[in-house]
Amino acid sequence: MEMKNKTIYILIILALISSLIIGIQRHIAENQYRRVDLTIDLDELMESAQGMDLKEVLTDLKKAGIHSVAVKEITLNKARAMGLLGVYSPSELRFLPGGWMDVLETEKLNTTDNMTLIITDSDRVFEMIKEQLTARFGKEKVAGYHTRDFKIISLAFPKTAELMNLELGFDFNQFDFVRELGLKIIPRIKNHPNLDETYIIQLFERLSEYPVSAIVFEGDEILGFPKENRLSLVSQYLRNYPFGLIETVTGPAPNFHQKGMEKVARLSGYNITRVFSLSRKEMKQLDPESILGKWSRSVERNNRIIYIKPIFKGHFASERNVALTIEYVNKLKTELTEKGFIIEDVKTIPFKTASKFLLVLIVAGATAAGVQMIDLILPALKRYRSILFVVFFIPLGIMLFTPMWILDILLVALAISIIFPSVALIWFIREACIRKETGASMNIKEGCVVFCKVVGIALAGALLLAGVLSDIRFFMKLEFFRGVKLAFVVPLVMIWAGFMAYWGKETAAKDSGALVKNMHHFLHQHILVKHLAIMGIGGAVLLIYLLRSGNLPGFSVPVFEQEMRNLLETLLLVRPRTKEFLIGYPALVLLIWAAANGRFNFLLPLALLAGVGLISLTNTFSHLHIPIFISLLRTLYGIILGVVVGIVAVVMIWSVARCLEKIQEVLVDE
């Protein structure tokens, strides 16, 4: 039984309705996800504010908008710099005044070169450091001694840079200091392979005594890694505190990968949020306005903890650097507040995953669209529509209810990103072919309708793509859309195949085997030098196109383009994508104008350029960390600007053509 067009359209409409339902649910959830935590790094602040009253500085920062303070674990280097203790090797003690070697002999402490001695006059520091060293090195390697005036810890481990920079738990005096100022705390917890369940329990019990707003782990491992039972224990505690995933600047992995983070995120019920921070190098190199812009725009990417490091300009005094930091934190708070965000403890996004029933409908609609694409290019397979639909839909539908469902929706998402831009332009090519055969004209109104249909088909695919990927794993970028390069290239191949099917010696509108016949004819053509030149230019353009696409751009953005982007970001709420408003939509306008005026020689290159824009449109909605409203607004801006650029291009080309015609007429008359 042949699958009717009506059935295909119904399935696509049902998929669109499902995507709209999911989109509305997501939009509501994103509107509720408006809390932003502005946190400042305590260690960096202490370094920036040297010689200043830290209490006054933090009080001013709190007034400016800082909500919490990120506190890192103490190290021997840090404790020594704070004057809390001294750290020595036995050989260093021999040269210190005060007869320290005699003291050690009195305490019957045997010293070796592979030993580190830590000396303090504080009972609190002594107990804290001894406890933390014991947790990491074991009881057999740590011993403590009391003299009349000092406390000594001996560690059977040499004094090395690694030891001096090893995180040794928190100095809870810093927690007390921050709490007294009325600020929240974000602990930066570092893992160590010897930290057992008892240590984890005691740590979180101690943290429960303080106003902790979130947890952000330090280093490349989650606390408890690699032990499964320890990670599970940490996950249980993280149900009470949002767990921060650190955003990377770029790359295929959109979060800084900390070992164990996927497991902990899942077991904590995805009580997670995203953290944005500029590196210290960037803080030094960028001007304050650029820093502010990056902080602000990061919130658009669903980052809800803005991890602020003080602005640091080496030629400025501490007072000036701190004043700049306070000024720009205040500007950031004002800007975010005006956009409707609240500076408060972060809560995780309330949307976790889409209904499986709605996802099944989207898969069915995507499969139906794929069948339609095959039918457009190879009408000979029309009688097999039902079989093709069943062959693809059944396994994809079943996979949704298996542990492989994430892989399933990634496959469906890739298919959607290929199918809809391809169908949009192959449909146009077919319509242009029919108009050429029948001699039908196209007025401005009809051209506008055609433009809307082409963009509408691509936008339908974009909505389906956003719907099928709607899951917190994609919002938080624990998972991300794969196959970006394929999604940018395969539709262009399909558009070329559509052109071959309708614009060769045979046309698919009349002959269902036209594509095969035209391909056979094409492959038997003689290749001239000009063809090689065109292929070389086309290959270079394709290479640049691929390098500019996806998460790993092959080269930096040119200065003039960056300036244009900055201007658009200043003038508009969000910046439209360059491939859309400067290439894709203008090419689509020119394509429709060329077809309406019988200039069919330019059909293929303009269709390929228009495809670039439609592919970009669909790809925009694969970035689930961008709120759906922002993606829609970006697309709308791109269409409006692209149409304007396209109309200007049409007018210029028409004007040049008219001038050339007049010149030719004058020359003929003469």
Image: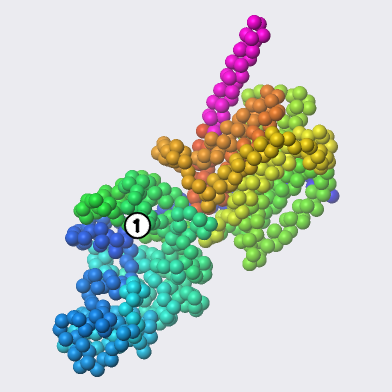
Principal secondary structure, stretch drawn in magenta: helix
Going 48% across and 43% down the picture, which residue do you hit? 557
Q: Is residue 485 above or below residue 96?
A: above
Q: Quadrant of the C terminus?
A: top right
> Where does label 1 land, which residue?
280
Q: Nearer the viewer, residue 138 or 555?
A: 555
Which residue appears at 28% of the width and 81% of the height?
89
Q: Secondary structure at mark 1?
A: helix
Where is residue 85 shown, x and y percent of the image? 23, 77
Quadrant of the rendered image containing residue 566: top left
Task: From the viewer's side, name the closer residue of 210 and 134.
Answer: 134
Decide which of 104, 306 is in the foreground and name it. 104
Q: Give the quadrant of residue 106.
A: bottom left
Q: List x then y, in percent, for residue 12.
A: 68, 46
Q: Callout 1, which amino acid? A: Arg
Q: Residue furthest top?
A: 670
Magenta region: 642-670
Q: Is 94 on the left-hand or right-hand side of 509?
A: left
> As displayed, is residue 203 above or below residue 646?
below
Locate residue 555, reporting x and y percent. 50, 47
116 falls in the magenta region: no
Is residue 256 rendered to the left or right of residue 601? Answer: left
Would residue 659 be counted in the magenta stretch? yes
Q: Residues within 10 Å of mark 1 (few under 14, many from 20)?
A: few
Q: Is residue 666 above or below residue 55?
A: above
**Residue 621 location in percent, x, y?**
56, 48
- Residue 578's place in the image compared with 245, above or below, is above
Q: Is residue 508 left or right of residue 475?
A: right
